[in-house]
Amino acid sequence: MAISGKRQRVRIVADDASLVFTPDDGAAVAVKPGDSFQLTAVPTWLNFGVEVALLPETLDSLLHGTPFFPLHWRSMDRNGRAGTLQAPASKVALQAALKDDPVVSELVFIGSQAAALDHTGDRTILQLKAPLIHVYDRNTLAVCANLAPATHGEAVSEVAGSGDAAVANQRFMLKQSPLTYVSAVTPSGRRSTLEVRVDGRLWNEVPSLFDRKPNAHVYALRQDDEQRTIVQFGDGVEAARLPSGRDNLRFGYRKFLGTGGNVRAGQLTTLLGRPLGVKAVNNPVPASGGQDRESRDDARRNAPLTMLTLGRAVSLQDYTDFARSFAGVSKALAVWMRTGGLRGLFLSLAGPDGAAVPETSATYLNLAAALRAYGDPLLPLQLKTYQSVHFRLKAKLKIASTAVVDEVLANVSDTLRWHFSFANRDFAQQVSLDEVMAVMQSVTGVDAVDVDQLYRLDPGAFPALIPRLFAKPPQLLTNGSLKAAELLTLDPGPLALEVMP
C-alpha cells in the first residue's frame, strides 16, 4: 500500500527555560510557547541509556498525564532545520498540520503472518510488516492500495532486417539508443528490455554464445562506445543461425536509462494509454535504482569483481563484490554480525551518487533475492542503506604573490570537494588533519595552510579542531538492532577559507 499525508505537528504550550531544540548542524536554542515543529520520527525516551520508541497509546497517556521525564522529538523547525526537541509530553500539545505543509509518502507492506489480517465486525485491521517511517497527522492521511510497479523507458518497435542462413554470426544494430535495462534477480542485477522475434517466434538473450547448442534460438548483446547496442546471432556451431526470410527479424524494446529516471515523488501524473476505469495516476514515492552508464574508470574497477565472484557468493569478500557489481548499487560492505544468537551477514549499501537504497525498492529486493539464489540460502542476511555523515573545516591559506587569489581559492574548494566526495570515499574511512592539509597544499599557488577547525557535523557538535575524524563501521546496537556503516564526506555547504596576510 501507499501511505501519504502531512507530518504531525507539536506545539510548545509551557514557558520553560529547560526546553531546547538542537539542530543537527548547530547549537541548542531555547524554545517558547507557540513554537511549532513537524515531527520526522516517532518520539523516544531513554530507558537506562537505551533509546526506546513510544507506542501511540503510551504517548497518548503521557500527553494527558503529568510525566516529568523529557522526550526526544525528532523534528523540523519553521526554517526547515532538522534536529531534536527535548521536552516532556506535558509541555507540548499535538497540532494540526498547516495548509502549506508538504505531503510525504511511503510504501508499506502487510505482514505475512496470519494475524496480520483481522476481520473484526465491520472493520478490517491490518498489521504492517514494519513501522511507518513518517509520523502523520491522521486527518490528512490517505491509504492507496491500487498500486502497480513502473519502470523507466520509452517503448520502440522496429523491423530490424532479414535473416540469411548462409551467413554466420549475423549482427544487427538497434536503430535507437540507449537500450533500457531494468532491475532483475540476476548476478548482474539487471536484464535488458529487448525482445527479439524471428518469423514471429521469440528468441532468448544469453550472456555469451560460447558453447551453445547449434539449434539454440539465442542471441548475445554488445555495447559500443556510443551506447549503441549490437545484437549477434550464432554460426550454426555455437547457437543457431538466423533462418532466411525477408524482413523476418523484429525488435521490441525500450530506450533511455540512467539517473534521469529517478523522478521525484508526485512527478508522474499522465498515462499515455489509459486502462478502463483509471482516472488518474501518481507516484507516491521517488523512483530509485536508475544508474547512468559506467564510465571507463568505473568499468575498470568493477570488471574484476564479476570475474572474482563468477556469479556466486561464497566468502565474505564475495558478498561485498557481488553487491558492488549489482546494478543500482555503487558501494557495499559485508561484515559478520551476531544477532539473536545467530551469526549472520550484514551488508551496508549505497546507491549511485550516494543515493539511498530503500527497502521497498526493486534494487534492494532483487539484490536480497539474488544473494539467496547465488549465495547460501540458509545464511541469516540483512541489508541496510549506509549512514551519510559530513564534516566541516575552516582554514587560512598563504597564497603566492604571483597567483590570482580568487582562482586559487576556487581551485582549493574544487579539489577538496572532489577528494572528499562520495565517489572517492569508502565506508568507515577516516579523515585526518594531515590529509586535509595535504590536499589543500597540493593546489598550485598555495604556499602554506593553517587549519583552524575540523569537526564532524553530529547533532549538538561545536566547531573544534579534531586531528582525526572517524566514520563508524557497521554496529550492533544495545537494543539488538543493526546500524549500517557510515561514509564521511565534506559538507556541501560553503567552505570557510580565508587568506593570510
Image (cartoon, helix red, strand yellow):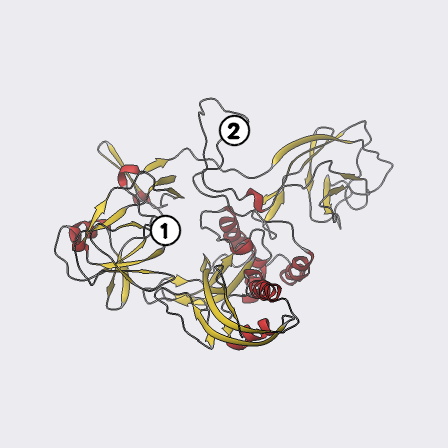
Q: Earlier in the sequence, mark 1 or mark 2?
A: 1
Residue 186 against residue 120 in the figure, above or below: below
Q: Is residue 485 visible?
A: no
Depth check: give the residue in front, 335 or 349. Answer: 349
Q: Secondary structure at mark 1?
A: loop
Residue 248 against residue 96 in the figure, above or below: above
Q: Which residue position holds label 1?
A: 80
Residue at 32% of width from left, 52% of height from top? 77
Depth check: give the residue in front, 197 or 189. Answer: 189
- Relative to residue 112, is residue 19 drawn left or right? left
Q: x and y percent of residue 48 in the render?
A: 23, 68
- Relative to residue 276, is residue 42 drawn left or right? left
Residue 260 against residue 432 in the figure, above or below: above
Which quarter of the figure has residue 153? top right
Q: Is residue 288 visible?
A: yes
Q: Which residue position holds label 2?
A: 271
Q: Amino acid at mark 1?
A: Gly
Q: Secondary structure at mark 2?
A: loop
Marks 1 and 2 sit apart, C-alpha to C-alpha, by: 34 Å
Mark 2 crowd level (few <14, some 14–19, many ≥20, 10 Å Cα): few
Depth check: give the residue in front, 43 or 182. Answer: 43
Q: x and y percent of residue 195 in the render?
A: 67, 36
Residue 465: image tag? none
Which quarter of the figure has residue 442? bottom right
**Residue farthest to the right, as pictured:** 166
Q: x and y percent of residue 415 in the render?
A: 60, 65
Residue at 56% of width from left, 66% of height from top? 416
